[in-house]
Amino acid sequence: MPVAAPARRPGLSLALSSVVTLTITVGCGGTQLDRLEGDPPSTYAYTTPATDRVHPAVDGVQRFLAAMKAGNLDAAFRQLSRDTRQALDDRAAKANLTGTDLLRLGKMPVGNSLQGALPFDPIAVFVVPDVETFQVVPTPADANEQRLNVTGKGGRARELVLKFEGYGWRIHQPALPFPEQP
């Protein structure tokens, strides 16, 4: 007995083509590919030239800075390494706060209270204010730690350590530069 072909439904094919078009349109705004030497100009909208590339560790620091400036302290906190977040949380817990609270308040408790707390600028503590340049310190390709030399306005410079955790580079400074007791 011959099997009949399924009936066509015009609305279904239109809906599927709309989904495909939407997927392609939405996908175009995503991550761009590295531009290779000799790529034709027609690919430039979808590729990034070598001069525009940013080292992933630099991107991690820039994400921290952008989150701090936007007031998104939860995102800024996530740009710190696990050990650094734990150190902030441990310090904050003594005053019944969280590490994110410390970033929000801009105060570091001394002992177990905010009374007499030390004011601090998280950007100055973890990076430098008004960053002007980043310089990547050469590191073996398989290392899970990266060092960056960062310079701010006025020549203030420091070397940052970043750790690769959770698919990204995180600022690593678990030894907080504040005294434990008054």
Image: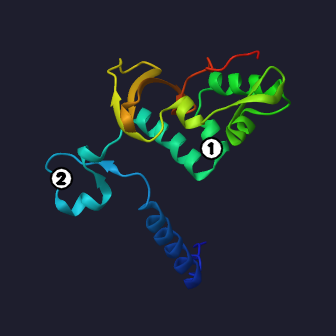
**Residue on which the image places disc 2:** 39
Instruction: Compare residues 4 and 21 and report the one nearer the observer.
Output: 21
SS label for mark 1: helix
Which one is closest to the eye, mark 1 or mark 2?
A: 1
Relative height, residue 149 to residue 10 (above, below) = above
Q: Sequence order check: which comes first, mark 1 or mark 2?
A: 2
Quadrant of the frame with the C terminus: top right
Find the distance from the CA under tag 1 to the CA under tag 2: 37 Å
Relative horizontal placement of residue 49, taking residue 71 as reference (left or right): left
Q: Position of residue 170 (x, y in %)?
A: 54, 30
**In the rendered structure, are the residues bearing label 1 and label 2 in contact, judged by CB atoms less than 8 Å apart?**
no
Which numbered marker is on residue 134?
Answer: none
Q: Is residue 101 above or below residue 143?
A: below
For this rendering, which residue is in front, 58 or 14? 58
| SS type, badge 2 | loop
Q: Toward which corner of the image does residue 140 lie, by quadrant?
A: top left
**Residue annotated with mark 1:** 75
Horizontally, residue 56 falls left or right of residue 50, namely right
Q: Quadrant of residue 99?
A: top right
Q: Position of residue 32 (x, y in %)?
A: 36, 52
Picture coordinates of residue 117 (x, y %)? Answer: 75, 29
Mark 2 nearby-residue class (10 Å; few <14, some 14–19, many ≥20): few
